[in-house]
Image (cartoon, helix red, strand yellow):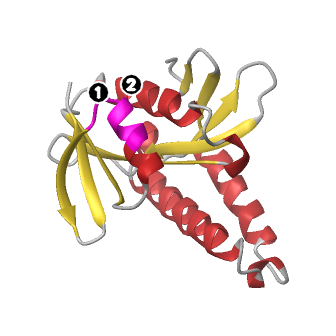
């Protein structure tokens, strides 16, 4: 990882967005989230979730400007051509030594191992940072693909809350 938020793996480049890049991406998302797209049942929920996430991350980056790597979105791009295949990131600075990770991959790039590769790299990076002693992740009890990603990265089952499962990774 370099000082600007760039991690490379065998097949991927993970790039941490700056505050300006995140704000620009949010502006583009807000412009795209207009009728008729906003009324499409197939894409509206995902678009609304992404809008909320980007708004939340923009606020976090404003509050914690020195904690950008914990507060921003990391783009997952294919090495070589830069095709965006997904995004991931931490959900804020460490609390009690723990950070939480979240991730998503574009549907057409699923089942290729990209998320396992990216999540493992970001977790390795996160655990190398001062003050981080563990990484948490929550996933739906029926989201087996996400559970497989977490297991492949070394996360262990911690607890279940209704339909959500909490996993934890320690060094």
Magenta stretch mostly in which secondary structure?
Answer: helix
Location of the C terminus (image quadrant): top left
Residue 49 higher or lower than 105, as above or below = below
Measured as percent of width and height from the top left, residue 128 is found at 30, 22
Measured as percent of width and height from the top left, residue 88 is found at 52, 43
Q: Is residue 68 left or right of residue 155?
A: right
Q: Is residue 120 left or right of residue 80?
A: left
Q: Residue at the spot x=75%, y=74% of the render?
A: 33
Q: Which mark is residue 125?
A: 2
- Write down the region rendered in magenta: 148-155
Q: Is residue 31 left or right of residue 130?
A: right
In this view, the residue in front, 112 or 169, is 112
Q: Residue at the spot x=62%, y=33% of the render?
A: 112
C-alpha span from label 1 to label 2: 6 Å
Q: Which mark is residue 29?
A: none
Q: Is residue 139 left or right of residue 98?
A: right
């Amino acid at each position: 990882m370099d000082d600007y938020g760039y991690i490379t793996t065998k097949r991927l480049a993970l790039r941490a967005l700056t505050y300006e890049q995140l704000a620009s991406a949010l502006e583009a998302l807000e412009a795209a989230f207009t009728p008729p797209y906003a009324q499409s049942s197939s894409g509206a929920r995902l678009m609304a979730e992404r809008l909320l996430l980007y708004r939340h991350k923009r606020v976090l980056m404003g509050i914690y400007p020195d904690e950008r790597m914990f507060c921003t979105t990391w783009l997952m791009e294919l090495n070589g051509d830069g095709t965006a295949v997904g995004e991931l990131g931490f959900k804020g600075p460490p609390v009690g030594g723990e950070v939480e990770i979240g991730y998503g991959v574009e549907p057409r790039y699923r089942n290729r191992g990209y998320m396992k590769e990216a999540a493992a790299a970001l977790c390795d990076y996160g655990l190398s940072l001062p003050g981080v002693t563990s990484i948490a992740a929550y996933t739906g009890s029926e989201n087996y693909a996400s559970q497989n990603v977490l297991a492949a990265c070394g996360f262990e089952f911690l607890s279940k809350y209704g339909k959500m499962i909490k996993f934890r990774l320690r060094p």
